[in-house]
Image (cartoon, rainbow, N blue to C red):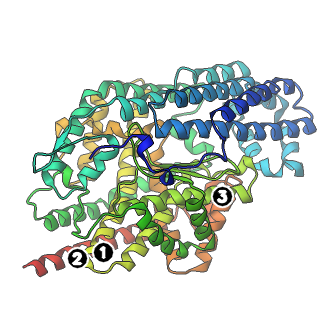
C-alpha cells in the first residue's frame, strides 16, 4: 500500500483550523502580540499580597494560557500532519520557545505565594471571587513543602529548551525510522510504517503478517539505542525534578497531585493479575478459531471474522450517528458539528504522525487527528477520540479555563465509555454471527490493551523509574528483559529475542504512568457504558456530571459523587465480569463456526 502525499488527500478529509488561526501570517501576527503580552508578567512580582492584584494576575494568566495554547495547537496540528514541512516545524519551534519564556517569566509566582503563608492563602480560599480556584489553592497549601524557589523554577522552565526528548523520539519513529518493504504470500511488496503496521497484522495473509512483524522488529532493533536514549533521558529528567521537589518517587508525585491513593494503583494491577486467565482463554480460542497449533505474536490481532472489513469514513458516518444516540443529544449534536465543521483529519499521508488523538484549546472546536485504515476498528477508534471531544465541549461550557480539563489520571474515562458504547451498538446491530465475531474481537482487544496491557506497562514503567530513583543500572537490555518477563506473565503468546525491543514504539512512556491511567479509565468506563447503553438515565446523568466537573474536584471525590468508588471491589468485579462475558461469547461463536464448517 502506497502512502499518498498530503496534497493528494481530498480536502473534505482534512481539518479546518481557521478557528485557531486563519493562516500562517495570522499565526505570526498573534504570536507577536502574545510575545508582547507575556512581558507584562514581571510587573506583578512583589504585588500578589493584594487579593485584588492576585485576582487580576490569575485572570491575566488564564488569558495568556488560552492565547498560547491556541498557537501551540495550531502549530502542532500542522506539524503532525506533515512533519517534512519546514514552515510547520518553524512555527512549532517559535511558539514552543515563547511558551518556555512565559513559564520563565512567571517563575517568581510559587515562591511569592509560599512566602505569603498559609493564613493569606486560606483568606484567598475563603474569598468568593476565588471560588473557581479553590481546589488549586488547597492543593498548593498541601504541597508547600514541594514548592521550588524562583531560581529553581526559572532553571526548570529553561530546561525545556533542550529536554524535549518526546519530540525527538516522535521524529525518529514517524519520519526517520525506515523499515524494509514486506512481501505478501504472492510476493508483492508493501511499504511499512508505524501507522501501517497494525493494518498488516490484521491481514488474512499470514505470510504478510509474519513478514511485517519481523520487519518491524528489525527496524526497532536497528534504532533501539536512539529510541531508548530518548526514553531514558526523559525518565532521568522526571527523576531529577522529583528529587528537586522532594517527593519520594515519581509515582507519589503523580498520585499526590490528584489526591489519588496508591491503593488504587495497586488494586488495579492486583485485579489484572488475578484475572489474567481470562486473557489466556481468549488466546486459546483465537488459536482454535484460526486453526493453528501454535499462536504467534503476528496472529494476535488478525480478524477471526470473514465479514467484509472495508468501511470508509463516509460509510461509517451514518453508523456512528446511530451509536451516539445512546449517549444523548449532546453527543448527536456534537457529531453533526464535527463532520460539517471539519474537526477531523481522517486519512494517513506521507510524513503524517502515526498517533491518533483529539486535541484542542479552550472555546475552540476540538481537533481529531486520525490515520483511518477503512476497517471496522476505525469506528471504535473514532468513538474513543470523539469522547474526548465531547468532554472538551462540556467542560468549556461548564467550567472556567482554570478547571476546563479533567484530571489527567481519569481523562480517558469519556473516550473509553464512548468506545464501549460504540461496540455494544455495532455488536447488537450485527447481521450475523460472523459480524458479531468481528466486533466482539475488537472490544476484547480494547479491554486487553487497556487493562492487561496497561497494567503490564505500568509495572514496567514502575520498574524503570525505581531503577533510576535508586541509582541502579538501567540500560536497553535491562529494560527490555523486564518487559519480556512481564510479557510472559500477561500473555500466553511466545516472545522472541529479535522482537524484545518492539516495546520502544510506545511513546506513552513520556507521559508519567499514562498506561496506568488507561487501565483505571477502562474499569470506570465499563460501568458508565453499561448504564448509558441500557438506558439508565441516572448513570447517564452521572456520566455527564463527571465530564462537566472538570478539575473543580478531585477525581476520587468526583467519581464517588457520580456513583463510582475506585476502592470498591464491586467496580472491578463488574469490569472483569464484562471481560469474561466477552471471552465466553467469543469462545461460543468460535465453537459454533467450527461445528458449522464440519
Helix, strand or loop under label 2: helix
Helix, strand or loop under label 3: helix
Name which residue lies at 10% across and 61% down: 292
Name which residue lies at 69% across and 28% down: 103
Read off the residue under disc 1.
436
Give the number of the disc on residue 393: 3
Read off the residue under disc 2.
589
Mark found first going from the N terminus, 2 or 3: 3
Q: Residues within 10 Å of mark 1 (few under 14, many from 20)?
A: many
Of residues 591 and 310, the one drawn nearer to the viewer in this rendering: 310
- Side of 281 where 459 appears, left or right: right
- Side of 380 where 131 appears, left or right: right
Nearest-to-viewer mark from 2 and 3: 3
Q: Is residue 171 above or below residue 491?
A: above
Helix, strand or loop under label 1: helix
- Residue 543 horizontal/vertical position (percent): 60, 68
Amino acid at each position: 500500500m502506497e502512502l499518498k502525499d498530503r496534497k493528494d488527500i481530498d480536502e473534505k478529509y482534512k481539518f479546518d483550523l481557521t478557528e485557531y488561526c486563519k493562516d500562517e501570517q495570522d499565526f505570526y501576527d498573534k504570536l507577536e502580540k502574545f510575545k508582547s503580552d507575556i512581558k507584562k508578567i514581571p510587573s506583578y512580582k512583589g504585588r500578589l499580597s493584594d487579593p485584588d492584584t492576585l485576582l487580576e494576575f490569575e485572570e491575566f494568566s488564564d488569558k495568556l494560557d488560552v492565547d498560547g495554547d491556541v498557537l501551540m495547537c495550531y502549530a502542532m496540528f500542522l506539524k503532525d500532519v506533515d512533519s517534512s514541512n519546514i514552515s510547520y516545524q518553524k512555527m512549532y519551534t517559535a511558539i514552543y520557545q515563547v511558551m518556555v519564556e512565559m513559564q520563565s517569566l512567571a517563575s517568581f509566582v510559587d515562591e511569592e505565594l509560599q512566602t505569603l503563608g498559609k493564613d493569606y492563602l486560606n483568606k484567598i480560599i475563603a474569598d468568593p471571587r476565588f471560588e473557581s480556584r479553590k481546589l488549586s489553592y488547597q492543593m498548593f497549601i498541601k504541597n508547600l513543602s514541594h514548592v521550588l524557589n524562583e531560581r529553581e523554577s526559572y532553571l526548570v522552565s529553561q530546561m525545556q529548551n533542550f529536554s524535549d526528548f518526546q519530540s525527538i523520539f516522535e521524529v525518529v519513529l514517524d519520519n526517520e525510522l525506515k523499515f524494509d518493504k514486506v512481501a505478501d504470500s504472492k510476493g508483492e511488496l508493501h511499504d511499512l510504517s508505524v501507522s501501517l503496521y497494525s493494518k498488516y497484522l490484521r491481514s488474512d495473509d499470514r505470510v504478510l503478517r509474519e513478514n511485517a512483524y519481523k520487519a518491524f522488529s528489525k527496524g526497532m532493533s536497528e534504532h533501539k539505542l536512539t529510541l531508548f536514549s530518548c526514553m531514558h533521558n526523559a525518565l532521568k529528567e522526571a527523576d531529577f525534578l522529583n528529587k528537586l521537589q522532594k517527593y519520594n518517587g515519581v509515582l507519589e508525585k503523580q498520585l499526590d497531585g490528584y489526591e489519588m491513593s496508591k491503593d488504587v494503583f495497586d488494586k488495579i494491577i492486583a485485579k489484572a493479575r488475578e484475572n489474567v486467565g481470562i486473557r489466556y482463554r481468549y488466546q486459546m480460542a483465537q488459536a482454535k478459531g484460526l486453526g493453528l497449533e501454535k499462536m504467534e505474536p503476528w496472529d494476535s490481532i488478525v480478524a477471526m471474522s470473514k465479514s467484509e472489513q472495508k468501511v470508509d469514513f463516509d460509510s461509517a458516518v451514518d453508523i456512528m450517528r446511530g451509536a451516539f444516540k445512546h449517549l444523548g443529544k449532546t453527543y448527536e449534536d456534537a457529531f453533526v458539528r464535527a463532520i460539517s465543521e471539519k474537526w477531523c483529519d481522517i486519512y494517513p499521508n506521507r510524513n503524517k504522525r502515526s498517533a491518533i488523538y483529539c486535541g484542542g484549546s479552550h472555546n475552540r472546536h476540538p481537533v481529531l487527528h486520525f490515520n483511518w485504515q477503512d476497517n471496522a476498528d476505525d469506528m471504535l477508534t473514532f468513538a474513543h477520540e470523539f469522547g474526548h471531544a465531547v468532554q472538551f465541549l462540556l467542560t468549556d461550557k461548564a467550567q472556567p479555563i482554570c478547571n476546563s480539563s479533567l484530571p489527567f489520571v481519569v481523562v480517558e474515562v469519556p473516550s473509553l465509555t464512548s468506545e464501549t458504547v460504540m461496540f455494544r451498538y455495532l455488536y447488537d446491530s450485527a447481521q450475523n454471527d460472523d459480524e458479531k465475531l468481528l466486533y466482539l474481537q475488537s472490544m476484547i482487544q480494547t479491554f486487553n490493551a487497556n487493562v492487561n496491557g496497561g497494567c503490564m506497562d505500568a509495572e514496567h514503567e514502575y520498574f524503570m523509574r525505581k531503577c533510576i530513583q535508586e541509582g541502579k543500572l538501567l540500560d536497553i537490555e535491562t529494560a527490555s528483559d523486564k518487559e519480556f518477563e512481564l510479557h510472559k506473565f500477561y500473555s500466553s503468546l511466545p516472545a522472541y529475542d529479535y522482537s524484545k525491543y518492539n516495546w520502544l514504539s510506545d511513546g506513552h512512556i513520556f507521559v508519567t504512568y499514562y498506561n496506568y491511567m488507561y487501565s483505571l479509565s477502562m474499569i470506570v468506563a465499563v460501568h458508565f457504558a453499561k448504564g448509558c447503553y441500557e438506558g439508565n438515565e441516572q448513570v447517564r446523568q452521572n456520566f455527564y456530571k463527571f465530564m462537566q466537573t472538570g478539575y473543580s474536584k478531585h477525581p476520587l471525590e468526583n467519581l464517588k459523587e457520580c456513583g463510582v468508588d475506585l476502592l470498591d471491589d464491586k467496580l472491578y468485579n463488574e469490569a472483569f465480569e464484562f471481560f469474561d462475558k466477552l471471552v465466553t461469547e467469543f469462545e461460543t461463536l468460535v465453537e459454533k463456526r467450527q461445528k458449522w464448517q464440519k
